[in-house]
Amino acid sequence: MSCSRMSARFYAGGRIAGMTRQIENIDQMRERHKREIERLQKSCKHKKLSNWIREWWAIGHSTGYMVKTCNFCGKVIKRKGLKFKFCKIKRSIEGNHGQKA
């Protein structure tokens, strides 16, 4: 049976004929997607990995780790710590406004 014939036969008004489906709220949808992603990551073979990239928990906020992720499922496969170099601050944030410290 072709897809067009099947869809015409089984679908009526955007839903499966004879079945009513309750609309999910946002929390139910997030939980369903979380389970689907977990299932995908468990079944994935993780054959193709990304290069080492810096991991961020928010824009401009590094976690301090470099990671390699699976290009297919997005799971973090390898993680290593960064070596930070701290520099001496010459001016305060409140401002010397271009003046030498």
Image: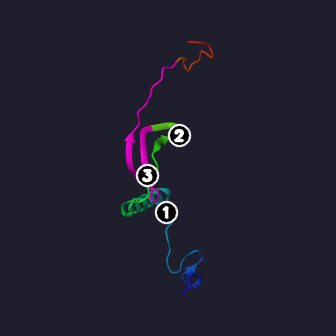
Residue 87 in the magenta stretch? The answer is yes
CB within 8 Å, label 1 to label 2: no
* Stretch in magenta: 63-89
For mark 1, what is the residue?
24
For mark 3, what is the residue?
69
| Structural distance between the alpha carbons of marks 3 and 2 | 19 Å
Q: Quadrant of residue 8?
A: bottom right
The C terminus lies in quadrant = top right
Q: Earlier in the sequence, mark 3 or mark 2?
A: 2
Mark 1, other Cα within 10 Å: few <14 / some 14–19 / many ≥20 = few
Amino acid type, callout 3: Thr
Q: Is residue 8 left or right of residue 38?
A: right
Q: Could you say where residue 67 lies in the image, as x and y percent from the top left? A: 42, 46
Q: Is residue 33 above or below residue 17?
A: above
> Mark 1 or mark 2: which is in front?
2
Amino acid type, callout 2: Ile
Q: Residue at x 55, y 21 (%)?
A: 93
